[in-house]
Image (cartoon, rainbow, N blue to C red):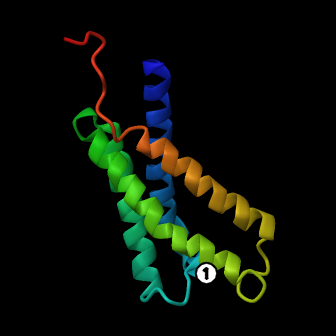
Amino acid sequence: MKRLKNILKVVLGIGFILAGINHFRVPGFYVALMPDYIPAHTWMVHLSGATEMVAGILLLIPRTTRWGAWFIVVHLLAFLTVHIWMIQHATDRYAKIPMVFLWVRLVFQFVFLAWAVWYTRPELSSVES
């Protein structure tokens, strides 16, 4: 189980790093998704990309894994409102995005939350004293 957990940690960490990099590669894609209530869209896209990369890196470093996991949890919770807002404005603002995709994306936020929470707990030693 420990090996699987480590493999999935690497997948999550690299996924967050790559997602963060993508915010800088194609910022216009993310700017178009930004809700109206968030100011400075381009700046916020870059900030969220940078925080995703930092969270992914922290997750991959054994000494900072728990910090990285909590950083990912906070990041995902902060963006839950964005996903909900997108569903609420699907017909007027995001008509080109299939509604099913918006709902699947929201559900996956909870999957990623549970995945990240898995790494917030300290590892139990194999021998308890």
Relative to 65, residue 84 above or below: below
Q: Quadrant of residue 127?
A: top left
Is residue 58 shown above or below 21?
Answer: above
Q: Which residue is depicted at the point 43% across and 27% down? A: 6
What residue is rendered at 76% in x and 73% in y? 97
Q: Is residue 15 visible?
A: no
SS assignment at label 1 = helix
Q: Nearer the viewer, residue 54 or 99?
A: 99
Measured as percent of width and height from the top left, residue 94 is found at 72, 81
Tell me if residue 110 can be seen. yes
Disc 1 crowd rating (10 Å Cα; few below 14, some 14-19, many 20+) is: few
Name the amino acid, label 1. Ala
Give x and y (percent) for residue 29.
60, 73
User: Front-most of 86 and 95?
Assistant: 86
Side (left or right) of 109 relative to 93 = left
Q: Is residue 23 above or below residue 62?
A: below
Q: In which quadrant is the C terminus drawn?
A: top left
Residue 21: percent from left, percent from top: 46, 58
Residue that carries the numbered disc 1 in the rendered image: 32
Of 50 and 106, nearer the camera is: 106
Q: Residue furthest front?
A: 129
How many numbered dots are placed on residues in this image? Answer: 1
User: What residue is drawn where x is 29% and y is 42%?
Assistant: 66
Q: Is residue 124 above or below residue 104?
A: above
Q: Residue 115, how many percent across, how many down?
A: 50, 42
Looking at the image, the residue that sits furthest to the left is 129
Question: Image quadrant of residue 128?
Answer: top left
